[in-house]
Image (spheres, rainbow, N blue to C red):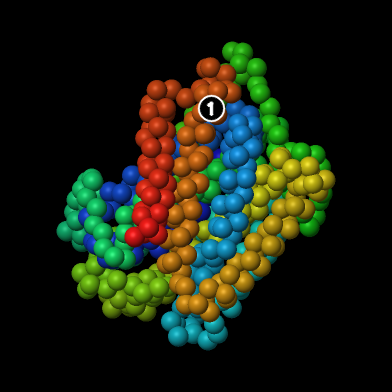
């Protein structure tokens, strides 16, 4: 049954885990590791509630939230448009591939390497009869490569004192270090980007559904548009009758969601994120090295070569590329699913097009946009780290909108026996306040800057 939770780990690894938080650790040491742990922990509760809705109805959270207000449909469409033009994953993965094959001064412009990675991801995505099969097999394989590789690296370079420093930083709750480069709004964005972040968490419902879990079994899976036509409005779900037998089934599936989310997403995600930060803490921070744009992987790998040999450098570059590619791959699939979900369930013109044909158009379109944006921003010397911090801000705004609404959705529409309990309500309320505070502070700080 492994699949949905592991895919969520693959989505998360290439963003906050590999890029933002190791960079923060290289800059400030272990003192803010607690914030990364908090970010993933809050998202665990969010994924549980997204999973609750998915197994009870077969729907994604987007489809359910669209019933509450049409405002949210347009709000998320606007944010998705902005996110499509932030190809941080593609640029970082392209650089990782170039470094792996030719070193930091390899041939060709950065956008060309990003194009190779993005087109490769699209080709693999469309290789199976069912899209989910391609996603699960590819991402689970990459996650295994990443975890095994990181364990080898960490056990080769770390000491008991290093582990003790990491544990102390994890328990240093509430300490925040800022400077002109790492501002408070960037700190908040990094918390939102820890874990799957933003729209990534919403993808959990699609993977549960395509896996046939709960009421998702009644929703046709997304088929490869190059092989079959998808008929009907397959995104619309069902309401089950809350009799004794159905509630027993719901509880069985919900136990699966709890295990999948806590073991695969939370524990494995936290484990891999801390291994990446551990590398930065041991290798970069003692030397005072804060990597430049796109240099984090290379700096870590080069210094690892001094202790592990050339094999260590190659191993870490393989791990880095696998992490970034898994995020690109999952993000390309997820981006297509989100666009199809929003348009196909809310606009008549989109319903005249088969869902998987629409998905194909968005998958190809997002690939082309990613290549173009990488070339365009590269012309103006905008690096991958900038993309990630801007993406983190958009992530925070999207989560400020949908986190409280997911809780409201489950409390309003699900049968009483299937609704969240007090602990889940409390944790979702804490998460909602966190992301809403981020959004309010970001808007307020920008207005203050403009008025100054």
Query: Is 388 on the left or on the right of 60, as rendered?
Result: left
Query: Is 368 on the left or on the right of 393, as rendered?
Result: right
What's the residue at 61%, 34% (across, down)? 69
Q: Nearer the viewer, residue 414 or 116?
A: 414
Helix, strand or loop under label 1 = helix
Residue 253, given in percent of the width and then of the height, sits at 55, 29
Characterize the local packing of mark 1: few (<14), some (14-19) or many (20 or more) Cα atoms within 10 angstroms. Answer: many
Query: Is 177 on the left or on the right of 51, as rendered?
Result: left
Residue 216, given in percent of the width and then of the height, sits at 65, 34
Viewport quadrant of the C terminus: bottom left
Residue that carries the numbered disc 1 in the rendered image: 410
Viewport quadrant of the N terminus: top right
The correct choice, above or below, for 82 with respect to 342 in the image is below
The correct choice, above or below, for 33 with respect to 313 in the image is above
Residue 39, given in percent of the width and then of the height, sits at 37, 46
Among the 4 quarters of the image, the one containing residue 108: bottom right
Seen from this angle, which residue lies furthest top? 244
Q: Nearer the viewer, residue 70 or 177?
A: 70
Among the 4 quarters of the image, the one containing residue 23: bottom left
Q: Tell me if I can see residue 305 in this picture.
A: yes
Residue 224, given in percent of the width and then of the height, sits at 74, 53
What's the residue at 62%, 45% (across, down)? 74
């Amino acid at each position: 049954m492994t699949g949905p939770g592991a895919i969520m780990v693959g989505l998360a690894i290439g963003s906050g885990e590999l890029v933002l938080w190791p960079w923060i650790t290289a800059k400030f040491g272990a003192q803010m590791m607690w914030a990364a742990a908090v970010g993933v922990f809050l998202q665990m509760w969010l994924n549980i509630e997204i999973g609750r809705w998915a197994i009870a109805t077969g729907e994604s959270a987007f489809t359910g939230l669209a019933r509450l207000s049409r405002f949210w449909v347009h709000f998320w469409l606007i944010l998705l448009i902005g996110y499509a033009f932030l190809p941080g994953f593609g640029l970082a993965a392209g650089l990782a591939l170039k470094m792996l094959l030719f070193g930091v001064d390899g041939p060709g412009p950065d956008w060309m390497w990003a194009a190779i990675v993005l087109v490769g991801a699209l080709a693999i995505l469309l290789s199976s009869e069912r899209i989910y099969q391609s996603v699960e097999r590819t991402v689970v394989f990459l996650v295994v490569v990443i975890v095994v590789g990181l364990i080898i690296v960490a056990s080769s370079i770390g000491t008991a004192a290093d582990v003790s420093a990491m544990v102390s930083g994890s328990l240093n709750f509430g300490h925040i270090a800022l400077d002109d480069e790492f501002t408070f709004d960037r700190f908040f964005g990094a918390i939102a980007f820890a874990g799957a972040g933003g729209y990534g968490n919403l993808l959990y419902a699609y993977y549960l559904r395509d896996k046939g879990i709960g009421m998702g079994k009644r929703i046709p899976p997304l088929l490869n548009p190059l092989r079959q036509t998808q008929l009907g409005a397959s995104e619309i779900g069902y309401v089950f009758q809350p009799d004794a037998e159905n509630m027993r089934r719901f509880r069985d599936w919900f136990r699966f969601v709890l295990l999948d989310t806590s073991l695969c997403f939370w524990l494995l995600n936290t484990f891999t994120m801390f291994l990446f930060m551990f590398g930065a803490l041991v290798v970069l921070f003692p030397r005072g090295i804060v990597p430049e744009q796109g240099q984090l992987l290379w700096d870590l790998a080069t210094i690892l070569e001094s202790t592990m040999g050339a094999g260590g450098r190659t191993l870490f570059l393989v791990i880095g590329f696998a992490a970034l590619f898994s995020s690109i791959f999952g993000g390309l699939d997820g981006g297509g699913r989100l666009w199809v979900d929003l348009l196909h369930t809310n606009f008549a013109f989109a319903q005249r097009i088969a869902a998987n044909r629409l998905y194909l158009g968005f998958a190809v379109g997002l690939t082309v946009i990613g290549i173009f944006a990488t070339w365009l921003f590269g012309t103006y010397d905008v690096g991958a780290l900038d993309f990630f911090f801007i993406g983190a801000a958009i992530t925070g705004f999207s989560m400020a909108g949908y986190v409280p609404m997911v809780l409201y959705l489950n409390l309003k529409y699900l049968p009483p026996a299937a609704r969240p309990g007090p602990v889940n309500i409390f944790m979702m309320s804490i998460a909602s306040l966190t992301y809403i505070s981020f959004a309010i502070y970001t808007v307020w700080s920008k207005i203050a800057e403009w008025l100054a």
